[in-house]
């Protein structure tokens, strides 16, 4: 499996150049992942790029790398905003991991009628997103936003392919016919969307999309829903 | 959210009839979910059906239900065998939950080259599958099999739509053209498929299917891969 670290904010990115990792990343590389001298690793540049590099001096506080060449980074098939009804804390963190790996560009976390109280701390969310990046090799994390309401973040857009997840109704498969822009996908919290929320979404032009005959946990629906939007063209 | 319990093995299933839940299910209903007298619940008949029922006598050791009518149970769009490279224990259990919710008919767990040692106990697996059924309303659990090798469970079948998950290669989207039978989908363990495994799969007629540009955890790939196979017609 690839070893991936985050480069320092002030580095100069050029082939053959050297950079020194900060204390956190040096510790991760040396102590957590036990990298060896001359190991080949990937380095996030924090601007949407990933560079290949070689470990030239191991040091648990300040490891030195030599940059090789930038990797070619692919992007998902389209830009998707996941509009997620906030589930309870642990399920939310798990859902953010899945959504990050599966390719959401933006995650809008909305307190819906069936959402539980409580919201993980921002630092906890940042740590989860960072771990997902290390795991999946995604150059930048998804953008996280907290809209005030479902109403506010689902205003009709002419060019957007807009869907909400609907379990148990397989026939409701909506095709992105003629829609060239980005997509928006609504996934409800545990307990699902309330009927008034479904009404609002239909009124805003969102179409139901079936994710199979059975009720999926929010974390599962995030992955199958994003796959439905990103992998089916 | 629906309350779902498993009916006793020896019950008679007819509208208006009564049945008594066993101790485990009575405890679950009364103590874990705190159901009330006259609550409307769903009961798995263990033969692929689900009945609506009413709680007529609450008792944490032997609760009595009155059966109403059988529910119409939908099935996924096609039969899929998930061939899963065994990941480490906790990830395997999580993958089984996702695969169950997302619609795998059969899950073949194979020790692949990059699989970790260790295998959860059968009772632990049974409990996880039972919890997934309660959660998602799936009338029967997926069949779990343990083939001796990848070779043994990927022998060519003329009518089967056969795929293996391939991360980072978006172009490799295979369509189920002319394939009317069931599908087989291979998902590698943590660390992915070994190159000799990919060679074997190609030789057996399996096609690569892209799950997006980034490396997904096994548990995520199980959900996105099954969505790719089941939701794309």
Image (cartoon, coloured by chain):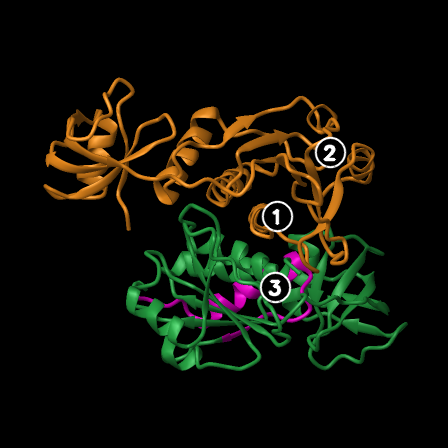
Chain colours: A orange, B green
| Mark closer to the chain start, 2 or 1 | 2
Q: Chain of mark 3?
A: B
Residues in magenta? Answer: B117-144
Q: For the residues carrying marks 1 and 3, which lies nearer the camera in this image?
A: 1
Quickly name the residue at label 3. B103
Quickly name the residue at label 2. A113
Q: Quadrant of residue B202?
A: bottom left
- A210 relative position to B18: left or right: left
Query: Mark 2 near mark 3, Cβ–Cβ under 8 Å?
Result: no
Q: Quadrant of residue A6?
A: top left
Quickly name the residue at label 1. A225
Query: Mark 2 near mark 1, Cβ–Cβ under 8 Å?
Result: no
- Residue B205 is tagged as none
Q: For the C terminus of chain B, give its image quadrant.
A: bottom right
Q: Element type at marker 3?
A: loop
Q: Element type at marker 2?
A: loop
Query: Which residue is farthest right?
Result: B16
Going 42% across and 35% down the picture, which residue do you hit? A128
Q: Position of residue A18 (x, y in %)?
A: 15, 27
């Amino acid at each position: 499996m690839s070893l991936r670290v985050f480069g320092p904010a002030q580095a100069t990115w050029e082939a053959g150049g050297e950079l020194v990792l900060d204390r956190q990343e040096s510790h991760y590389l040396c102590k957590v992942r036990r990298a060896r001298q001359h190991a080949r690793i990937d380095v996030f540049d924090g601007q949407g790029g990933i560079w290949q590099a070689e470990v030239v001096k191991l040091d648990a506080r300040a490891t030195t790398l030599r940059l090789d060449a930038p990797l070619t980074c692919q992007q998902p098939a389209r830009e998707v905003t996941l509009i997620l009804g906030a589930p309870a804390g642990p399920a939310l963190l798990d859902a953010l991991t899945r959504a990050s790996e599966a390719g959401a560009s933006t995650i809008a976390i909305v307190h819906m009628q069936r959402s539980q109280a409580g919201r993980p701390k921002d630092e906890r969310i940042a740590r989860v997103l960072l771990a997902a990046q290390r795991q999946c090799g995604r150059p930048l994390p998804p953008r996280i936003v907290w809209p005030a309401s479902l109403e506010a973040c689902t205003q009709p857009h002419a060019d957007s392919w807009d869907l909400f997840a609907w379990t148990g109704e397989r026939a409701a498969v909506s095709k992105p016919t003629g829609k060239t822009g980005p997509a928006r996908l609504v996934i409800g919290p545990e307990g699902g969307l309330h009927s008034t929320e479904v009404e609002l979404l239909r009124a805003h032009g969102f179409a139901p999309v079936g994710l199979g005959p059975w009720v999926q946990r929010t974390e599962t629906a995030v992955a199958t829903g994003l796959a439905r939007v990103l992998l089916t063209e």
